[in-house]
Image (spheres, helix red, strand yellow):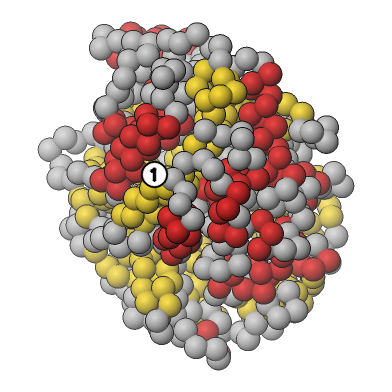
Amino acid sequence: MHYRPASILVSFLFGACAIAQADGPAPPGERLPIAAFGQLPFVETAALAPDGAHWAGILGINGRENVAILSLFDKSERIVRMSLPDGTEALWLHWVNSDNLLVGVHMLDSIQGQDFYVSRTFAVNRLSGKMTPILWDVGGQHASNVLWWPHDEGNEVLIAAQNSIYEGEDWWPAVHRVNVTNGHEHVVVPPHGGIVDWGADADGSVRIGIGYDDFHETSRLVYRPAGSRDSFRTVDRADARKREGLRVPFIYLPDGHGLVVHDDERGMSAIYEVDLLTQAEVRTVYVAPSGEVDDVVVGADGATLLGVSNTSLHAGTHWFDPELLALQAAFDKAVPGASADIVSLSRDRKTMLVLISAADMPGAIYYYSVSNGMLHRLAAINDRIGPTNHLAPVRVVSYQARDGLEIEAVLTLPPGRDPHRLPFIVLPHGGPWAQDTLRYDYLVQFLANRGYAVLQPNYRGSTGYGTAFLRKGEGQLGLAMQDDITDGVRWAVGRQIADAGRVCIVGGSYGGYAAMWGIARDPAQYRCAISIAGVSSLRREVNDFANFASGHKFTDDWKRMTPDFDAVSPIKAVERIRTPLLLIHGKKDITVAHAQSAKMYERMKGAGKTVEFVSLPLADHHFQRQEDRIAMLAAMESFLARYNPVNKP
């Protein structure tokens, strides 16, 4: 791989941006149509073929998700495109070789009267366009866990799949070797009682299994050396109730060692090399300068660690490969004020797909060739907004909670308005085990475009800040966790960013819970609230409680968050609410049952409270249909205009 001088790259980028700016950025404060923000991303996921000649994507076309394969060089070559039926969502895609693509999907299914997501895969041949179902005839819930990919032009993969929904031998996954061109398969590792997951090395040898006993919440790691046909032996055990975790390798080294992501002595995740047989730590490979390890990039050989990203809100990918490191530096220099993320590489790493975007810009996907040092735009993520148009400015802030804990947050200010005593929205994230970052967020930008300042606090219990910060949420659901959100509002009021009399709280999923609970816990703080797919009753109908393999663990995880569900459930505190509430929920949501909002609506109406309910018959938890997303934004706009107008009434 020969690296092109950065000056060539910079010269091309500046020229490309100058051409794109012919349309001009959106004028400060310009009101864009709802449909611009509600449009599905044209490219949700992109993957470059191993030979670098084609790319595939999960694309938003005509308001629906599609999977497509496109040529990079031959415009006359037909586009292979597959529309996914309603209820089926593409989760990921990966090239098996330069001619065959594997796509992971899940769909809603009813099993003995209870709704579950069922996962499967199908293969697509780019030459014929033929779709081949992979393991669709197995009888289990999940059959899409790909353990190994060929590193040449082979057609076979390893997939772990269940063969039954009933407790018994076939409920535990077996490992299948599958030819993706015809679907032929055979079992290479039969089910082992108690083993819920498997792992294979770069040569396609199944090396580890992960056992789990949900009743006791204990897990174990079973292992066998490379090339061995011996039985697996247990090399590590962990007890979730004692906060223990297994060291599961993501790369297998040739000497019986492996690379694992595990917490260091600070409770921050890092990368270590360990002896897989003895579990002894050999060396520290990577410690993030800030935040935790978020993801790893492994080479096409399955055995080379190319890069790692961390959870710092300012961080990108740290590359271990020196040529990718130099290339990333050139990209970063060429696009100040934006992020250039290498999202997919060809097998030889001489061509790649690059996402150039920012928190205030949806951006575009580019094709880059090392041989000529030029970026070619493939597609804008949102052509209604434009690939280089910057919207509302976004920055990271921090404030102290009332007990002195430092809280990091993302602040977005409406463009073209004096940042002084603005109408304000606090937008807590879902999860609650999640983190808001400096990435483009269509909902935040929509609200800012309508004139609101938006604060996204990473309250205690959020991920990305280490184990200690995560555990500060335990026992504090609806208490200190909620106070962190309120304290963010008070910080913004104290800085005269927010108008104390014009504050609304908005959120989705757990954030929807926080919105409802916020107006019950602090009824004088908020002028209105919007809950999107929110949880009103913490005791019922949250499907994390019914996880197919970890029901006891999830139940205990939630019990750690509060000693009394009823005491912090919004539906039990309706009498304290005096703030208008908008509820939005999809009937196809199986993460948080639609009944959570329906029952809250009935309880609010019965108590004479001001409440509205927008029930969307085909919407799922993430509003993956464009018309549902637009309907959600329209309802929010109308509600906010009535109860928290941008211009003082």
Secondary structure under badge 1?
strand
Q: Residue at (27%, 27%) from the top-left corner?
A: 33
**Is residue 263 shown left or right of residue 167?**
right
Q: Residue 416 location in percent, x, y? A: 42, 10
**Is residue 393 shown left or right of residue 466?**
left
Q: Residue at (76%, 54%) from the top-left corner?
A: 474
> Looking at the picture, does residue 231 appear above or below residue 13?
below
Q: Quick one: label 1, few (<14), some, or many (20+) residues within 10 Å?
A: some
Q: Residue 369 location in percent, x, y? A: 39, 28
Towards the viewer: 619 or 305: 619
Q: Residue 539 location in percent, x, y? A: 61, 67
Residue positioned most to the front: 608
Instruction: Name the amino acid, label 1.
Output: Thr
Q: Residue at (49%, 37%) from the top-left corner?
A: 528
Q: Which residue is mark 1?
A: 45
**Is residue 70 shown left or right of residue 645?**
left
**Is residue 76 shown left or right of residue 214?**
left
Towards the viewer: 238 or 461: 461
Q: Residue at (61%, 33%) from the top-left corner?
A: 525
**Which quarter of the rendered picture does the C terminus lie within?**
top left
- Quarter residue 123 falls in: bottom left
